[in-house]
Amino acid sequence: MKLLSWNVNGLRAICDKNALDWIEKENIDFIGFQEIKAHEDKFPKRIYEFPFKHMYSNSAKRAGYSGVMSLCNFDCEVKKCEFFDDDEGRVLEHRFKNVVLFNIYFPNGQKDEERLNFKMKFYADFLIYLKKLLDENKEIIICGDVNTAHREIDLTHPKANANTSGFLPI
């Protein structure tokens, strides 16, 4: 199975720039886009032309913000976020066979302490949910933008990011 995950930072922008033209040649089974920044009524027509059996989206209530989209070539049950109040369109959960595949755009906590607390609660709630799935003997795949780096090598500019919410000891 070929899976792809990509934070596109705006679905309309990448379609306008023909940045997705290569997809048709790659025989992809699943592609998860994060940060699509669009509601379904604003999706570019090009997105409907790709050779996928299914398209799912979870857009943020706020226009032009966040959101995830999944394109896939297999049948699955799809849910939006089961573990968190998801007004920001951060999660699509795909279930097939004994597998739970997540397409997630994890929160960024840089704005202020309240936002960092929001991010940390999201992480904690997701971990509890994952443990529940493991207790049910589910196999788990996580695709997405985690908005956190583990070590300096994971960052392009580690010094500039030293005290950002994505690179804190916690």
Image: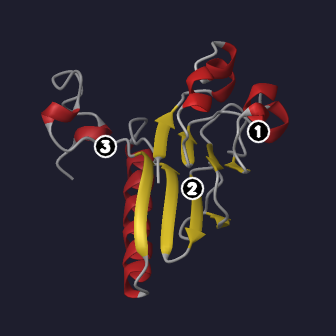
Q: Which mark is residue 91?
A: 2
In the picture of the structure, the residue carrying the numbered disc 1 is: 39
Disc 3 on helix, strand or loop?
Answer: loop
Q: Which mark is residue 148?
A: 3
The amino acid marked with disc number 1 is His
Residue 148 image offset from top left, x and y in percent: 31, 43
Residue 32 image offset from top left, x and y in percent: 55, 45
Q: Specify few, some or many for label 3: CA neighbours under 10 Å numbering under 14, 14-19, or 20 or more.
A: some
* Residue at 48% from the left image edge and 36% from the top image edge: 6
Q: How does the figure colour the protein chain or chains?
A: secondary structure
- State how far apart marks 2 and 1 are (Cα): 15 Å
User: Is 159 situated above or below 137?
Assistant: above
| Disc 1 to disc 3: CB gap under 8 Å | no
Disc 2 on helix, strand or loop?
Answer: strand
* Residue at 18% from the left image edge and 26% from the top image edge: 158
- State how far apart marks 2 and 3 are (Cα): 17 Å
Q: Which corner quadrant of the image does residue 93 belong to?
A: bottom right
Q: Earlier in the sequence, mark 2 or mark 3?
A: 2
* Front position in the image: 2 or 38: 2
Q: Please state if 138 lies on the left or on the right of 169 as rendered.
A: right
Q: Specify few, some or many for label 2: CA neighbours under 10 Å numbering under 14, 14-19, or 20 or more.
A: many
Residue 109 image offset from top left, x and y in percent: 40, 42
